């Protein structure tokens, strides 16, 4: 798994590439936590290149969501593959997160 960070004005975009599973989730959680600790209040997580997400990956997103909510911020997830979208729907995460089809929509949602 690889995460590329980009900033557009006051929005941090995290582009995740690979599997978000038990092996990679701790690293992903640390990266998201560091971004929030550095003052980000608006985060877009682009999951276009995420081929698989496990319960550990979902947990890392949930931890980040709780952290940013405490800072009065927001995370928007975009560009999910069909398989990742199904996991979000089955797990109920689609009701926890704002999920949008494209990065452009995600950026406009703030």
Image: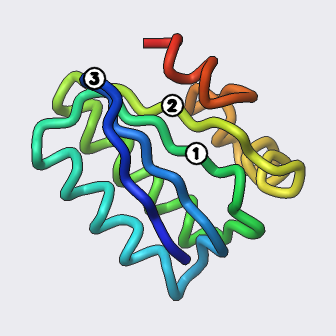
- Observer-nearest residue: 26 or 15? 15
Q: Which residue is mark 3?
A: 9
Q: Secondary structure at mark 2?
A: strand
Residue 2 rendering spot, x and y as whole percentages: 50, 73
Residue at (20, 33) in percent of width and height? 70
For residue 11, above or below residue 19: above
Q: Earlier in the sequence, mark 1 or mark 2?
A: 1
Q: Indicate the quadrant containing the N terminus: top left, top right, bottom left or bottom right.
A: bottom right
For residue 64, above or below residue 104: below
Q: Which residue is mark 1?
A: 46
Q: Secondary structure at mark 3?
A: loop
Colour option used: rainbow
Residue 12, located in which quarter of the rendered image? top left
Q: Which residue is mark 2?
A: 76
Mark in front: 2 vs 3 = 3
Mark in front: 1 vs 2 = 1
Work out how far the residue at label 2 is from the one at label 3, CA to CA, in angstroms.
16 Å
Work out how far the residue at label 1 is from the one at label 3, CA to CA, in angstroms.
17 Å
Residue situated furthest bottom in the rendering? 23
Q: Secondary structure at mark 1?
A: strand
Work out how far the residue at label 1 is from the one at label 2, CA to CA, in angstroms.
9 Å
Residue at (44, 49) in percent of width and height? 14
Mark in front: 1 vs 3 = 3
Q: Earlier in the sequence, mark 1 or mark 3?
A: 3
Mark 1 and mark 3 in contact? Answer it, CB < 8 Å.
no
Residue 68, located in which quarter of the rendered image? top left
């Amino acid at each position: 798994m690889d995460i590329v960070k980009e900033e557009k004005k006051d929005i941090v975009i995290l582009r995740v590439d690979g599997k978000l599973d038990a092996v990679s989730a701790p690293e992903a959680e640390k990266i998201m936590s560091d971004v929030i600790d550095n003052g980000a209040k608006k985060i877009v997580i682009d999951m276009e290149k995420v081929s698989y997400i496990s319960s550990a990956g979902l947990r890392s997103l949930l931890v980040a969501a709780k952290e940013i909510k405490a800072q009065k911020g927001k995370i928007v997830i975009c560009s999910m593959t069909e398989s990742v979208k199904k996991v979000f729907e089955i797990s109920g995460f689609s009701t926890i997160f704002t999920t949008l089809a494209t990065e452009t929509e995600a950026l406009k949602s703030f």
